[in-house]
Amino acid sequence: QVQLVESGGGSVQAGGSLRLSCAASGSIFSINGMYWYRQAPGKQRELVAGITSGGVTKYADSVKGRFTISRDNAKNTVYLQMNSLKSEDTAVYYCYVVHYSVDYWGKGTLVTVSS
């Protein structure tokens, strides 16, 4: 079992910044990829960014150049630094990992960007 707890969401004006954190606990030995997804009202959940244990990253085109994913393997924590936020970034942000072929999701943290 893996538990994922997100934090750092909130309300911000357009152009502002937020930093999300996701702490993993439980049977977390050798988790490789850690990911951030988001789901806006009335829309499907979408991949925002991912990072491997070796630090290889990928981003959705919509956030490239504005968001940065990073990871502290010693703390089993993944971060999402979000800059130049736009109203369309408003969503619930979820942390996600696959561990031994089992999907694990956090409960999500709400990010609201007002224009």
Image: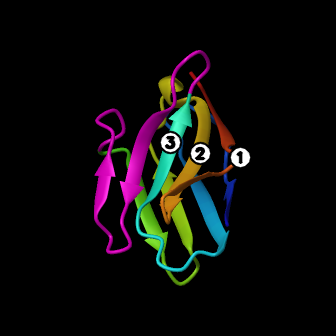
Give the residue type at disc 1. Answer: Lys
User: Magenta stretch: residue 42 in it?
Assistant: yes
Disc 2 marks a residue whose amino acid type is: Tyr
Secondary structure, mark 1, is loop
**Left or right of 31 in this view: 104:** right
Q: Which residues are magenta?
A: 40-64
The residue that mark 3 highlights is 37
Asked if marks 2 and 3 touch (Cβ < 8 Å), the reply is yes
User: Outermost residue, bottom direction?
Assistant: 74
Which of the pair 13/24 is nearer the observer?
24
Q: Residue at x 41, y 62 (%)?
A: 33
Is residue 50 rendered to the left or right of residue 56? right
Check whether the beta carbons of the residues at disc 1 and disc 3 lie within 8 A of each other: no
Which label's residue is closer to the chain start, 1 or 3?
3
Rendering coords of residue 30 (x, y %) = 47, 78
Is 36 or 70 nearer to us in this picture?
36
**Residue 94, which numbered label?**
2
